[in-house]
Each structure stands twice: as C-alpha cells, then as structure tokens.
Image (cartoon, rainbow, N blue to C red):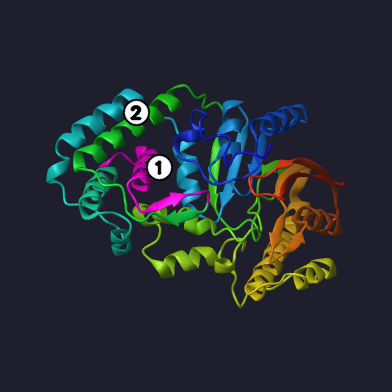
Amino acid sequence: MAMKVNPWSRVPVHRIYVFTEHGLTPGLVEAFMESAAEAGCRVVVDPFVGSGVVAVEAQGRCLGAVGVDANPWALVVSAAKTRPVDPARLLGWARGALEDAGGLEPLIPSPRLSRYHPRGVLEALGRLRALVEAAEPRWRPLLLAVHASVAERYSLLRRSPAPRLRRSAPRAAAGDVYREFMRVLAGAAADLAGHSFCGHVDLVWADSTLWMPGRVCGVLTSPPFANNIDYIRHSMLALLWAGLAGGSRDLGWLRGIQAPGCEAAARAWRPETEDPEARRLAEAIGGRRARGYRRFLLQYLHSMERHLALLAEALEWQAWYTIGDSILGGAYIPTHRLLARAAERHGLRAALEPLEPRWRPGRSLYLLRLEARR
C-alpha cells in the first residue's frame, strides 16, 4: 500500500502544522528511538528538521534533540511543537485580545499576500497577525503556526500534495476567520498540554550541507527528495505571513540556501556532482525539461555529498535516512543507491532497506542506514 502524504497529520502535537511527504513513519521513528536509547545516545540530530517529527518524538522520550534546517519556517513550526505553554493563560489572552481585534490596524507583512486572499479575509488575517506580534514572545511560534494554518484554509493555495491554485478562494466573514483561529489554537494548546517536554530541543538555522554539529551520536532524518518539489513554495504563504520573506527576491534567496530538490532551487553558480554513475543517469533524462532536471539533480547530489562528508567526520553511532527514488523526464533515478555510494566514499558503512511504495506510482521509499567505521 502506498504511503499517505503525511502519516502524522492526525497525531497530537505533530498535527499542529504538517509538511509534505517525508517517509518518517511512526513505526520507523519508534524503532530508531529505541535503538538510539540502547546505544546510549543522549541527543539525536535531525539535519533536515522540517515539521519537527524527530524533535517532538525525542523530546517526549526524554532525549535531547538538535534540529537543523535552511528553511526558517521549519524552525518556527518545530519551536511551536517543542516549547511548553500554559494553555489556560494563552487561551484566556487570545479570547480577550480577539474582543478588540476589529479596531486593530491589519499587519500584512508582504503586499504579495493580497494575491492569495479576498480583501475581507486578508484584513482579518492581518488583524490576527497584529495580535500575534503583540503576544508574549514565547507564544509566538505556536501562534504563527496556527495563523499559517488558518491563512492556508482561507487562501487560493491548496496542497495536492504540491501547492496548487484554486479557481476562487474560500470566502468568509472576519468573524469566521477569528473563530477558526480560536478553534485551531484551542486544539494545539490541548495537544501541547498532553505532551511531555522531558528532553531539551535546540533549533539551528543552517544549511546542513555546509554545517553540522561537531559530534553526532545518532541521526534520524528525511532529507529533501530529488523530485522537482519546491520546498520553499510549500511553505511560501507561511513565510510571507511570518515576515520571514517579503516577496519573490527573499523566496528566491531561501531557495538558494537549501539543497536543490527542484528546478527553482538550481543555480548557475552551484557545483555539480562528478560521480560518473550520476552523470550517466542524468544524461538519460529526456523531454522538454531535461536540461533543468539534469542541472538540479546533479546539484542536489553534490549538496548531499557535502552533507555526508560532514556527517562522516562527526558520526559516533548511526544515521538513518529515508530516501525517495525519482523518475525525471522518463528516466529512473535511484537516489537511494547514489547516496549510499557517496556515503561509502566518505568512509561510512551503508546499508539499504526497502520501505514501502510512495503516493506517486512507480516510486518507493528506502531506509539508508549509515554507520561510523571508527
């Protein structure tokens, strides 16, 4: 059976804000956490933290976690899920603040947001955003995550699972938007009230193809898949509303500092892999987009090779990566095999294990287990 887009979308805490497909199933995460604890790991690392699955699960098991990501929105979401709040105090403040929301000047961080919301909804979301800005700093990650969820619901954007534009945005009165905000916030606060904040979580805004912690006991992660998925576009609306990007230039810059998993993130200045097998496979890519596909694939593999070189210097126990293979321009690209070979070239032991089919026909997930040789 093909894996659902995100198996955590209905799991408390994780559902506060979910990202696209990543391959970290609950069973796999449980198996890793048990093995890491048995190996004596006190801190686990997720160098592509995304929506914070690894950080949340480690924290709940009293393990420390370090989450790294080049997308700042990923760090906001992970902070929202791993920072404790007082639910009664937070909800009391939100109810009181909403009583006076109609008189607030809307805070709309980017003029581009007017493309995605009807005017009335845009202004209501802007007033909510002004409330978030005035809230206690420790609440802001959660409030931003909730705001982003509500903004997505009342926008032209929808996920299928890639972002698409609706023909018309859902229309609603300001009161509907405010009520939805409170509904989502109450659910998120209840989820956090039942979560154990036993382990400490550190979040780092960095490109893990250029930086990793100096010592790493265990790694569990799902890096970007080389599937021509624009990971910045997936979080574009949230980045704009959070003020982390002001427009196209900022979004393009953020694409430029992440591992290029799509044509939009490829750059003329980025180096490409010299791996002969990868280059041979890239030459088999056909169709009208062949040039763009080849470029981002070879740049993606070079970025991941740099990451694996850093991992090889720091890894003390094991690293588990879920990797999705690809079909680009009619050519099958065994990304899992290419990354396993790259890891071995850098001195790591590599083993591959098939997991399950993905939602896209003809594609599968693999577990790449890496182990330090020393």
Alpha-carbon neighbours of circle 1 within 10 Å: few (<14), some, or many (≥20)?
A: many
- The location of residue 254, given as percent across then percent down, is 50, 63
Alpha-carbon neighbours of circle 2 within 10 Å: few (<14), some, or many (≥20)?
A: some
Rendered residue at 46%/51% (across/down): 73
- The location of residue 250, given as percent across then percent down, is 43, 66
**Which residues fall within the magenta stretch?**
134-161
- The location of residue 280, given as percent across then percent down, is 82, 71
Vertical side of 262 occupied by 162: above or below:
above
144 inside magenta stretch: yes
Q: Is residue 149 left or right of residue 23?
A: left
Residue hosting label 1? 145
For badge 1, the amino acid type reads Ala
Rendered residue at 55%/26% (across/down): 198
Which mark sits nearer the N-terminus, 1 or 2?
1
Residue hosting label 2? 186
Q: Secondary structure at mark 1?
A: helix
Q: Secondary structure at mark 2?
A: helix
Q: Which mark is residue 6?
A: none
201 inside magenta stretch: no
Viewer-closest of 171 and 66: 171
Residue farthest to the left, as pictured: 103
Vertical side of 91 occupied by 155: above or below:
below
Q: CA distance from mark 1 to mark 2?
A: 13 Å
- The location of residue 30, given as percent across then percent down, is 68, 29
Rendered residue at 59%/58% (across/down): 207
Rendered residue at 60%/63% (across/down): 262
Q: Is residue 234 visible?
A: yes
Q: Quadrant of the N terminus?
A: top right
Residue 178 appears in which quarter of the rendering?
top left
Q: Is residue 117 left or right of residue 229?
A: left
